[in-house]
Image (spheres, grey):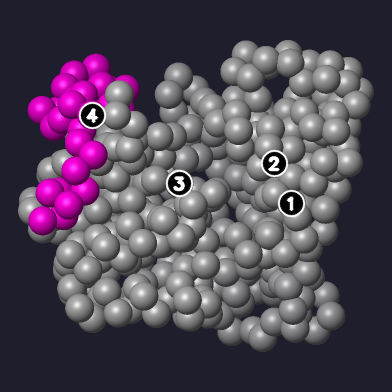
């Protein structure tokens, strides 16, 4: 059994606790939290499981890492604290742990990551013998391994398009929805996640990763952005009221340009209510979906709909992203110490997990 720590119990961390508990090759050794109110609580309760896991949450990072866990799922946010997240992750890698995380966007394509991010990780690997694999919660597999796999089914490939189409009224993270993405803000408000160059900072690594796998050279990476106001005030179950005239939908693309044309595209279509921007792409049903479209011969379209936590699509998407990360731990533990990306780490069957129930 691989001794595994989950660091953080928010939207990603609680799913990580469940995934580690369900994996037959992993043993949940500790759960790290920042909120003093969570210290001492059983990990099962924090993860929304019916029963306890016999692991009490702690905020003592030093003691947890001193116990030399073999793996760490770093689930704390890196959105507004990237330097702190990098420092935490480097600390865990230096302690000899295999670390999996969605927190460091720059390391989606680790070969082209900025030196100030890559070099501390490589130094920690050399010193402590740990490893690091970063994959996104948007979800990462939807912007790397899935489109690349599907592209291999065609004879001619003209465009690879990855879409996330979601109703954010179901997303349990109000600050991100209202302030990072700008839902419910005046149309002259500039959401931090949509500011020029930010989408490329977040998703550009996945564009470069796919280009590398497809054997093509990028001319550049471009961004497009469209925003729509709400025609009428709407009330959501999770976040309350969003007023008419404020931002109600966002559509942006991060485009990999090849020979002057957008050939590798990551597109996000996000609404706070289905009535806003009805002419934009919509999910087949429900609150959201992830879609891969290969334009070529033949044209191939694959839509993935995942649900968790009572049918919630946002939680389902997060859960699949967490499953990709947690499912990589045993492979990483058997591999040489190193800095890995999605092209290095195979997506494997759920060996030993079919029909398996734990807590």
Query: For this rendering, which residue is in front, 102 or 57?
Result: 57
User: Which residue position is annotated with label 4?
Assistant: 39
Decide if residue 316 is in sight here: yes
Query: For this rendering, which residue is in front, 258 or 123?
Result: 123
> Which one is earlier in the sequence, the residue at label 4 or at label 3?
4
Label 3 with label 1: CB-CB less than 8 Å:
no
Label 1 with label 2: CB-CB less than 8 Å:
yes
> Which one is earlier in the sequence, the residue at label 1 or at label 2?
2
User: Which residue position is annotated with label 1?
Assistant: 194
Residue 168 is marked as none
Callout 1: SS:
helix
Q: Residues under labels 3 and 2: Cα distance?
A: 16 Å
- To which quarter of the image does residue 197 belong? bottom right
> Which one is earlier in the sequence, the residue at label 4 or at label 1?
4
Identified at 15% across, 48% down, the residue is 64
Q: Residues under labels 3 and 1: Cα distance?
A: 18 Å
> Please, is residue 126 above or below residue 192 in the view?
below
Q: Residues under labels 4 and 3: Cα distance?
A: 18 Å
In this rendering, position of residue 259 left or right of residue 199 = right
> Please, is residue 121 above or below residue 12 in the view?
below
Label the magenta part by its dominant secondary structure.
loop
Q: Label 3 crowding class (10 Å Cα cut-off): few <14, some 14-19, many 20+?
A: some
Q: Label 2 crowding class (10 Å Cα cut-off): few <14, some 14-19, many 20+?
A: many
> Which one is earlier in the sequence, the residue at label 3 or at label 2?
3
In this rendering, position of residue 195 left or right of residue 127 = right
* Magenta residues (range): 38-66
Identified at 62% across, 13% down, the residue is 237
- To which quarter of the image does residue 208 belong? bottom right
> Please, is residue 253 above or below residue 34 in the view?
below
User: Which residue position is annotated with label 3?
Assistant: 77
Residue 181 is marked as 2
């Amino acid at each position: 059994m691989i001794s595994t720590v989950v660091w953080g119990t928010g939207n990603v961390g609680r799913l990580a606790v469940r995934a580690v508990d369900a994996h037959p090759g992993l043993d949940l050794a500790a759960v790290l939290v920042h909120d003093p109110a969570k210290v001492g609580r059983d990990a099962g309760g924090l993860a929304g499981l019916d029963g306890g896991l016999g692991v009490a949450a702690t905020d003592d990072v030093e003691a947890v890492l001193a116990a030399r866990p073999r793996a760490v799922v770093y689930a704390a946010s890196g959105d507004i604290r990237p330097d702190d997240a990098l420092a935490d992750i480097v600390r865990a890698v230096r302690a000899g742990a295999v670390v999996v995380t969605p927190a460091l966007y720059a390391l989606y394509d680790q070969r082209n990551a900025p030196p100030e991010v890559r070099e501390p990780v490589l130094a920690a690997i050399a010193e402590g013998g740990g490893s690091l694999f970063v994959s996104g919660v948007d979800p990462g597999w939807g912007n790397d391994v899935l489109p690349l796999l599907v592209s291999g089914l065609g004879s001619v490939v003209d465009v690879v398009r990855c879409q996330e189409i979601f109703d954010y009224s179901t997303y349990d993270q109000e600050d991100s929805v209202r302030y990072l993405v700008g839902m419910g803000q005046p149309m002259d408000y500039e959401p931090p996640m949509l500011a020029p160059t930010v989408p490329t900072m977040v998703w550009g690594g996945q564009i470069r990763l796919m280009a590398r796998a497809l054997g093509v050279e990028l001319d550049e990476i471009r961004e497009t952005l469209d925003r729509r106001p709400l025609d009428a005030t709407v009330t959501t179950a999770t976040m309350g009221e969003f007023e008419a005239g404020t931002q109600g939908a966002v559509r942006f693309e991060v485009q990999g340009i090849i020979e002057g044309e957008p050939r590798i595209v990551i597109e996000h279509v996000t609404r706070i209510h289905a009535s806003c921007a009805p002419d934009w792409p919509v999910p087949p049903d429900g609150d959201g979906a992830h879609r891969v479209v290969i334009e070529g011969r033949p044209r191939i379209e694959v839509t993935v709909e995942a649900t968790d936590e009572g049918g919630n699509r946002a939680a389902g998407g997060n859960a699949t992203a967490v499953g990709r990360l947690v499912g990589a731990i045993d492979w990483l533990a058997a591999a040489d110490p190193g800095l890995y990306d999605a092209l290095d780490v195979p997506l494997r069957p759920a060996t030993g997990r079919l029909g398996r129930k734990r807590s």
